[in-house]
Image (spheres, rainbow, N blue to C red):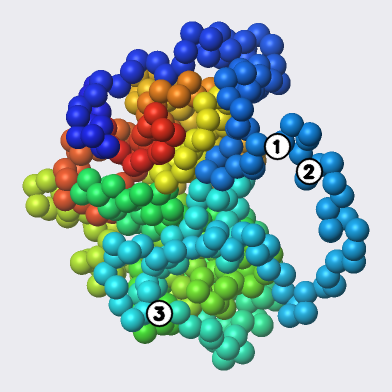
Amino acid sequence: MKQQDITSGRVQKAPENFLSKDGIKTVFAEARGGRRDFIRSAFAAAAAGAAAPLAMAQGNPVPPEGGDPFILELPEHAKGLGLGVATDGYGKPSKFESNVQRRQSPGLTQTTQASVSFAPLQSLFGIVTPSGLHFERHHQGWWDIDPSKHRFMVNGMVKAAKVFTMDEIMRLPSVSRFHFIECGANTAAEWGNVAVPTVQYTHGMISCSEFTGVPLITLLELAGADLKNGKFVLAEGGEGSSMTRTIPMSLILSGEVIVAYGQNGEMLRPENGYPLRLVVPGVQGVSWVKYLRRVELGDKPYATKDEAIHYIDLQPDGMHRQYTNLQECKSVVTTPSGGQVLLDKGFYNITGLAWSGKGKIRKVDVSVDGGRNWRPARLETPVMSKALSRFNIDWVWDGKPALIQSRATDDTGFVQPTYKQLRAVRGTRSIYHNNAIQSWLVQENGEIKNVQLS
């Protein structure tokens, strides 16, 4: 395998192993003595070779010989009276975290109303995306709708069309479940070898939340739905684009599809569909219709504008794949990742996210040499179906170039493909459903860049 050196234009052979001999011994020590001994020895090795503390991107200055004043001197916040409760009644993040925000990609077509914002995956922990950092995709802008005036209708192959108010929906038995939502165009730029700089822009059109609402099957049954002959549901949104999507009844009968009003313990945010949206686990985000106003039960797919000419996959022979809704098994390392800098060699925790629209993640393997060798990462609990899963793995960086990758496998046995494997089937002209392995190049100066391996 050869890897383009993006800083000099030369082609360099990827090293077969990025750990020094001492580093390899340390890795083996992990199995013998456990992770605590492994981490302790890795930090000791780093301290012996460098004066600066181990840090990512922005670290603390080297303490003076007399000791660190931030530990020796009592800080102001330990000597005075703090602030009272939030005056506006709603808590906000620390001012020191103001740089953690969803962002619009400068590479997208600019309009008077931004239509896409990307979640800052590199700055998030665990699996839940805070509602204020949830990625956005708008087809005709977002609205803050008065819930007292919002109505939801069920019609089509039912005994009698039925209209629900928000109060009536919220009186019904509810469920709460954690699920990821991913735009079908997530990682789209990578199809064309466009190296957007950070994981926020490569994979940031994904988020994971706890959604609360009423199973759609309950509302269909209340309207007397013909569950024997009804095969598909048309979901329609209430914004200007009248977003419409076909949902197979096979998903709805399982009880997974939810008419949701809650997200992360509170009402949906307006940009996420307040007061009502559809939750279709494992299916691309465009089918999670926002500002949901109607579902219609029918006996065949509806082939609406948003599924006949949009969100379809162009194949190498010029044909299109239609109704390719499923988001297949995928993962990405979020730290260390593009745009970050390793300030010193030594121990690092490699962490990332994995997900599958087919079910649970079974395992994640991580490579630091461009896929030559793989090690199993730790899957952190809980591991839930059609939700994000967090993985971690210990790594000692020896200061030499490294190529970091992750490869997920779900509980159906599906293994995340390489770009070579994906393009062999899908060609190079696609936009949607890119689930290929992502590569991050760690350069000798510690800077990390987005690269692709053929």
Question: Mark 1 to mark 3: distance in Å?
Answer: 50 Å
Disc 2 residue crowd, few under 14, some 14–19, many 20+, Cα 10 Å? few
Q: Which residue is mark 1?
A: 63
- Element class at badge 1: loop
Residue marked by disc 2: 69
Q: Position of residue 184 (x, y in %)?
A: 34, 56
Task: Give, as a three-letter code, the residue at label 1.
Answer: Pro
| Residue at left offset 48%, top offset 21% | 398
Judged from the image, the secondary structure of the residue bearing numbered disc 2 is helix
Where residue 200 sits in the image (x, y, percent)? 43, 53
Image coordinates of residue 402 in percent, x first then y, are 39, 27
Distance between mark 2 and mark 1 Cα atoms: 8 Å
Residue 407 shows up from this direction: no
Does label 2 or label 1 sit earlier along the sequence? 1
- Image height of 427 relative to 208, above or below: above
Q: Nearer the viewer, residue 441 or 370?
A: 441
For image coordinates 56% across by 14% down, the residue present is: 27
Marked residue nearer the N-terminal end (2 or 3):
2
| Count of marks, rendered view | 3
Q: Amino acid at mark 3?
A: Gly
